[in-house]
Amino acid sequence: MTDISARRRLEVLPRWLRLALAIGSGAVLGLGQAPWDLPWLAFAGLIAAVAMLRAAQTPREAAGIGWGVGLGYFGLVLSWVIEPFQIDAATTGWMAPFALFLLAAGLALFWALAFWGAAHATARRRLLALAVCWAAAEFARAYLFTGFAWAMLGSFWLETPVIQWSAVIGPHGLNLVTVLLAGLIVAARHWAAALGSAALLAVLLLGGQMLTPPLQDLEGRPVVRLVQPNAAQRDKWDPSRMQGFFDRQVGFTADMARNGYERPSLVIWPETAVPTLLNNAEELLGVVSDAAFPGKVALGIQREEDGRWYNSLVVAGLGGKIEEVYDKHHLVPFGEYMPAAALFRHIGVGGLAQRAQSGYSAGPGPHLVDLGDELGQALPLICYEAVFPQDVRMHPMRPDFLLQVTNDAWFGAFSGPYQHLAQARMRAIEQGLPLVRAANTGVSAVIDGAGRVIDSLGLGEAGFIDEHLPPPLRVTPYSVAGDLPMLPVLLLLGLVAFVKRRGVSR
């Protein structure tokens, strides 16, 4: 089918049907994310979206297609956003549909801008322009307005060998190559495009297989214990139940080692696991450290200093002595703090996850915690911080592993927790580092530097797992270079896509 015939077929459709097709292709693209994990179906949705852009006649029409694709994608993938509003449904439940629509529609504007920009290229270069603009839009989404890098476009490759390329070219490079591949397939009626798409797909699959590290021998490695209390969010801060959840975690901590392992060298509790401020927790930390003896304990807790509240992780040793403190620095807007807090306070709206009236304060930034010679140094990530590839490599020193504590009870029991786990796996691949995550309601997991889940405790289960801590893998190119090399690549490809040759009309 030629560009003209495709355009004519699109033009004869009513506008509402064109928008519906765009939304549908975006929703199919979203099926590549957890918990569906259908990468090839998602890729088909991407191809459909690219084909619709190719047939668009004007930049305005292209922008509408891009917005529809984004609305379908983010509307499906971020459907878990309604869950936090149901914790106190009587007060905030009415906000849920508005929050989902506004978030999806707002994020879709990034994709609308990408499609609008691509439509300004010549017909021969439009597909290349779309790859550049779409990758640039995802880059902007990861950084602007504190960033929201959740479910990046190329992450649907997670369950395939292709995902290993993110250790080389990073998530934004993977976004670019993914759209380029879809564009080549759409243009495959030309022999050069057909040959190029087949070659690129082979490189992605075979190269990804070659980049996948073999399983490591974990014999003799230190043992970590991940504690999962399974405290539902609506019950977590109930005064009549807080002590019970705390005692449950202490019991799991003191329990005998499993699988024939020795006592764990490190016990990890999830985010905000202790029902009091760190300022008043000396006695409770003593109880926890006694239960964990002879290992250390890393746990999530809140603390207050000079009237400011922090969402923190502390490492406690013998007798409950505090050895390390890390304060979360990348906070969730509208969750842990409110932008324009005074305005929202005036109308009685506060952050959903904040425990202080003014919200949490941000910590100074990434900070390695020293866990001794046996375990080495860990980079703490509290919940949302594991979503951002750029945050994980901000510290100048390379850690021995990544340590995530999270409370995914906020995300419900369907898609959100699994998507959060998937993004933790992405960070492990990008850095070539193991990641251990303790989640309040699940999924708690030990992940190796290739993104493989070595052991896990399922969603909605209470218990613990003991597992050897995998050693770090190779230093990846992305862990060294980060996102910076993508800027000149996008600029160069943008020049190729948009700068007209002399004597060639648009």
Image (cartoon, rainbow, N blue to C red):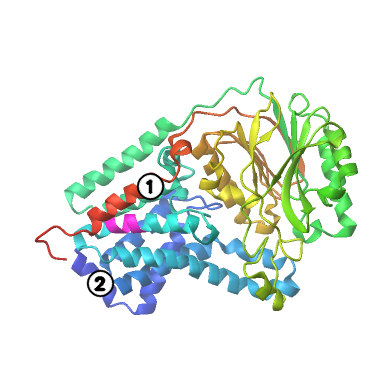
Determine the secondary structure under disc 1.
Answer: helix
Left-right relation of 147 to 291: left
Please say whether residue 187 is visible from this viewpoint.
Answer: no
Image coordinates of residue 362 in percent, x first then y, are 66, 54
Question: Residue at point 86% right, 46% down?
Answer: 281
Q: Earlier in the sequence, mark 2 or mark 1?
A: 2
* Quadrant of the snapshot with the C terminus: bottom left
Residue topped by disc 1: 486
Q: CA distance from mark 2 to mark 1?
A: 30 Å
Q: Is residue 374 magenta?
A: no
Residue 50 percent coordinates (x, y)? 32, 60
x and y, in percent, of residue 466 in the image: 72, 32
> Looking at this rendering, what residue extends furthest in the front direction?
306
Q: Is residue 464 above or below residue 81?
A: above
The residue that label 2 is drawn on is 57
Q: Is residue 406 visible?
A: yes
Q: Which residues are magenta?
A: 128-133
How many numbered discs sit on the rendered protein? 2
Q: Of the residues shown, which amino acid type is indicated by label 1?
A: Met
Please tell me in which quadrant of the rendered image residue 186 appears.
Answer: bottom left
Q: Check disc 2 and give the amino acid type.
A: Gln
Q: Residues within 10 Å of mark 1 (few under 14, many from 20)?
A: some
Q: In front: 439, or 336?
A: 336
Horizontal and vertical percent position of residue 105: 49, 70
Q: Is residue 298 above or below residue 501?
A: above
